[in-house]
Amino acid sequence: MNPAKYEALRDRFRRVFDSKWSRNELDNYDELRDKFAIHMTEIATNLSRLAHAYESDDCDTTCLANQAELFFVDCVPHLMAAGQIYDEVPMTFPEQAGVHDWEGFVDEEVAS
């Protein structure tokens, strides 16, 4: 996506934010509005690639795993931030609290 398309998409998400909130509801309206638009726009490329991987017969397991990982490490944090700015992100599933014992996790590269 070229810079002009990104900016047009940001403008569209600014209008989405405008449809939910008004300036008199939020002290830092402009800042939150811009952050929301940036977070929603930053995911466009990786989100499109994942969507393509869902549809593509030529995306093998490695391809799909790579796109899923990019989604989790890039898109999800942006979506969480945008969701919390826009409204509330509900904790619907127990797994959202995490299922891994990260304190007991040792990175082999760091350990050696």
Image (cartoon, rainbow, N blue to C red):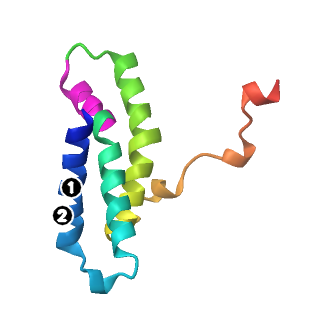
Q: Which residue is painted at 81% across and 29% down in the image?
A: 111
Q: In front: 104, or 46?
A: 46
Q: Which residue is painted at 38% across and 43% down in the image?
A: 75
Mark 2 vs mark 1, CA separation in Å: 6 Å
**Identity of the amino acid at label 2?**
Arg
Badge 2 vs badge 1, beta-carbon distance below 8 Å = yes
Question: Would residue 92 be seen by someone viewing this image from the given angle?
Answer: no
Q: Which residue is painted at 55% across and 49% down in the image?
A: 99
Image quarter where the C terminus lies is top right
**Magenta-drawn stretch, dominant element (helix, strand or loop):** helix
Image quarter where the N terminus lies is top left
Q: In front: 97, or 5?
A: 5
State which quadrant residue 81 falls in.
bottom left
Residue 82 x/y as whole percent = 36, 59
Q: Secondary structure at mark 2?
A: helix
Question: Would residue 51 be seen by someone viewing this image from the given angle?
Answer: yes
Residue 90 x/y as whole percent = 37, 67
Label 1 Cα neighbours within 10 Å, binned few <14 / some 14-19 / many ≥20:
some
- Which segment did they paint magenta? 46-56
Magenta includes 49?
A: yes
Q: Which residue is painted at 24% across and 80% down in the image?
A: 22
**Which residue is outermost to the bottom?**
24
**Identity of the amino acid at label 1?**
Asp
Residue 68 x/y as whole percent = 38, 32
Q: Which mark is residue 11?
A: 1
State which quadrant residue 60 falls in.
top left
Q: Which mark is residue 15?
A: 2
Q: Secondary structure at mark 1?
A: helix
How many marks overall?
2
- Asked whether, in this view, residue 93 is left or right of residue 19, the answer is right
Magenta includes 23?
A: no
